[in-house]
Amino acid sequence: MDWGRLSRERLAMARIERFHFSHSRKIDSAYQYVSEAARAGVILQSADSGAGRHVVIDGRSLLNFGSCSYMGLQELPELREGAHRAIDEYGTQFHFSRAYLQCPLYAELDSLLRNIAGRPVVVAPSTSLAHIAALPVLVRDGDHMIIDQFAHASLHTAVQLLSKVPLDIVRHNRMQALEAKLLELRNVPGNVWYIADGLYSMLGDFAPFAELKQLLDRFPKLRLYLDDAHSISWLGSCGRGPALEHFANDDRVVVVMSLNKAFSAAGGALAVPSEEIAARIRQCGGPMLFSGPIQPPMLGAAVASARLHISPKLGLLQSELHARLQACAVGIRKHGLALANDALTPIFQVQCDSPRIVFDVAEQMQERGFYCCVCVFPAVPMNRPGLRFTVTRHNTLQDIEEFVPALAECVANARGKRRMESGISVAAS
């Protein structure tokens, strides 16, 4: 037993839990970090134009390495025509709550999504509202919840609504910690829900699906609730993502799909084990009754996207993206960039020593004609700032060949500048 490591783990978890329950401190710290990033001119910007390869900010055209539209579907004629047809038939808005009447496009979308997911689905206005609708219905009296510390903010928000259900936070992807907690909770009267992402939006790494499958086999009370928003479309059969590839036939797993991001429409969908569960969420989940619907233009785009997903064309588009990811991975190794992990996904994060370095790198990259994103608190823990960039089907191989060495140089420049400033400060003191 490594007692030193165990002590460090416990100390880290104590810090997580203490910070998690300090609401005022969290808000004050978030305001501080976000304000600093805004003053640096690297967040809360407005685009003049641009939805694909380029984005225009303050009159400057930048190569876009910050988009979540990994497959670049939003510019395809099929999706545009789907939105136009829906406007022509239903107008810009369908003037009813879904509790009373829903736009006919919902039925078509539901049927297509079932073909993609391989199980019943419930369409929601967004993935965030899907969580808020589903978790209070799924989690019952006597249950217990465990959430990954890096799970999306919308999941952390949703679990707080279940204030009477016990909740634990485990360190990111630490399956030994999850196993220990499951052993500790083996006598709880209800189920134990593990709540996590399928693909983490900041670090770009996957949930450990194989290990989760082993835990499902060992612990009958374990249930999984996985937000796979960032994997949908670009990975898996019909673009259903890796979580459904692993667990489509497991009745103890719920997977949430995004109809935004790479799907390039709007809304979210819960892929659930049975029609009975789908009906419960549809009829009892708060946002399913009281939140506004997806409006016709985006429903039309979602139907068109779903049709594309079950066509042979999707595989060709996926292959185009994967070739770009491979090229980026080669460039990263060549130029010695240290990433948060080595998973081959469209999301990459270069971890930095401080937010100041992150802001410096982002500013330098914009000066060189590239747009990428900063990752600071509250998007990531305070001690894990980083520079996040994404690769999409819009990026050409030449774009990637230019971007990676520029990023490596900017990171080296920012770190060198920071070391020099620290040395001067120490000498002055």
Image (spheres, helix red, strand yellow):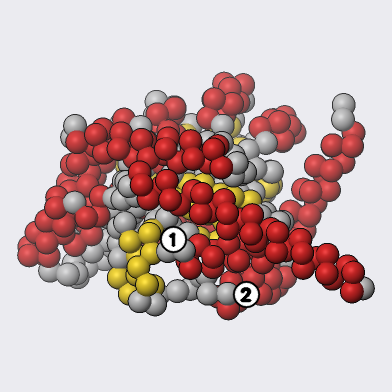
Q: Under tag 2, what secondary structure?
A: helix
Q: From this viewpoint, is residue 102 visible?
A: no
Q: Nearer the viewer, mark 2 or mark 1?
A: 1
Left or right, residue 249 beside residue 206? left
Percent position of residue 426, x then y: 88, 67
Left or right, residue 124 beside residue 107? right
- Name the residue located 36 percent from the left edge and 35 percent from the top edge: 323
Q: Quadrant of residue 415?
A: bottom right
| Residue at image mark 2 | 36
Quarter of the picture containing the C terminus is bottom right
Q: Report the amino acid beneath label 1.
A: Phe
Query: What numbered label is drawn on residue 199?
Result: none
Q: Report the amino acid beneath label 2.
A: Glu
Percent position of residue 301, x then y: 20, 54
| Sequence-wise first label, 2 or 1 | 2
Q: Under tag 1, what secondary structure?
A: strand
| Residue at image mark 1 | 370
Percent position of residue 406, x then y: 51, 54
User: What is the crowding at mark 2: few (fewer than 14 residues within 10 Å), some, or many (at least 20)?
Assistant: some
Which one is in front, 151 or 411?
411
Percent position of residue 36, x then y: 62, 75
Rendered view: 368 above or below 278: below
Q: From this viewpoint, is residue 76 visible?
A: yes
Which one is in front, 287 or 100?
287
- Name the residue located 31 percent from the left edge and 56 percent from the top edge: 53
Confirm or deny contact between disc 2 and disc 1 (CB under 8 A). no
- Name the residue located 84 percent from the left edge and 71 percent from the top edge: 425
Rendered view: 327 above or below 78: above
- Label 2, label 1: how many angstroms apart (C-alpha)? 21 Å
